[in-house]
């Protein structure tokens, strides 16, 4: 059986598009607990699944990743994909 390489993921950068920035309609936002994130500065693991799966490309790849709330729609995909549960969705008021 021949070895097959996995397809590369498409990654884009946030820009002001047709709908523009998120504005004030988002009801939830992701909250990152950097101490649980496997991509934090003291770890050799580079997870970055939140960055990879974000449909709005509003998460900056890094240690730890950073969310650009100007473009985040609050969909929760980043929290769902995080294998260490380092991201949880909270209300816009922080609760």
Image (spheres, helix red, strand yellow):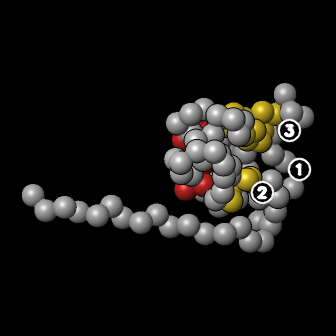
Please provide percent x and percent y for residue 14. Answer: 71, 67
Q: Give me the residue at 73% from left, 45% from top.
A: 74
How far apart are labels 1 and 2 at the CA level? 14 Å
Q: Give me the residue at 41% from left, 66% from top.
A: 8
Q: Is residue 89 visible?
A: yes
Q: Residues within 10 Å of mark 1 (few under 14, many from 20)?
A: few
Q: Which residue is mark 2?
A: 68
Query: Which quarter shows the N terminus?
Result: bottom left
Q: Residues within 10 Å of mark 2 (few under 14, many from 20)?
A: few
Look at the picture and state if 1 lies above or below 18. Answer: above
Q: Earlier in the sequence, mark 3 or mark 2?
A: 2
How far apart are labels 1 and 3 at the CA level? 9 Å
Q: Residues within 10 Å of mark 3 (few under 14, many from 20)?
A: some
Look at the picture and state if 30 lies above or below 2. Answer: above
The secondary structure type at the circle numbered 3 is loop
The secondary structure type at the circle numbered 1 is loop
Q: Give me the residue at 68% from left, 59% from top.
A: 60
27 to the left or right of 6: right
Total number of numbered discs in the rendering: 3
Tell me which corner region of the image, top left, top right, bottom left or bottom right, holds residue 36.
Answer: top right
Label pair 1/3, CB-CB below 8 angstroms: no
44 to the left or right of 4: right
Q: Earlier in the sequence, mark 1 or mark 3?
A: 1
Q: Which residue is mark 1?
A: 24
Q: Nearer the viewer, mark 1 or mark 2?
A: 2
Q: Nearer the viewer, mark 1 or mark 3?
A: 3
Q: Give me the residue at 84% from left, 28% from top.
A: 95
Q: Which mark is residue 92?
A: 3
């Amino acid at each position: 059986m021949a070895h097959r390489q996995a397809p590369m993921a498409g990654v884009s950068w946030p820009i002001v598009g047709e709908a523009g920035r998120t504005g004030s309609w988002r009801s939830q936002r992701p909250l990152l607990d950097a101490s649980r994130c496997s991509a934090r500065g003291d770890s050799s693991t580079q997870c970055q699944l939140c960055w990879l799966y974000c449909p709005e490309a509003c998460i900056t790849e890094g240690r730890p990743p950073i969310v650009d709330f100007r473009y985040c729609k609050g969909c929760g995909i980043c929290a769902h994909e995080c294998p260490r549960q380092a991201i949880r969705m909270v209300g816009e008021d922080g609760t």
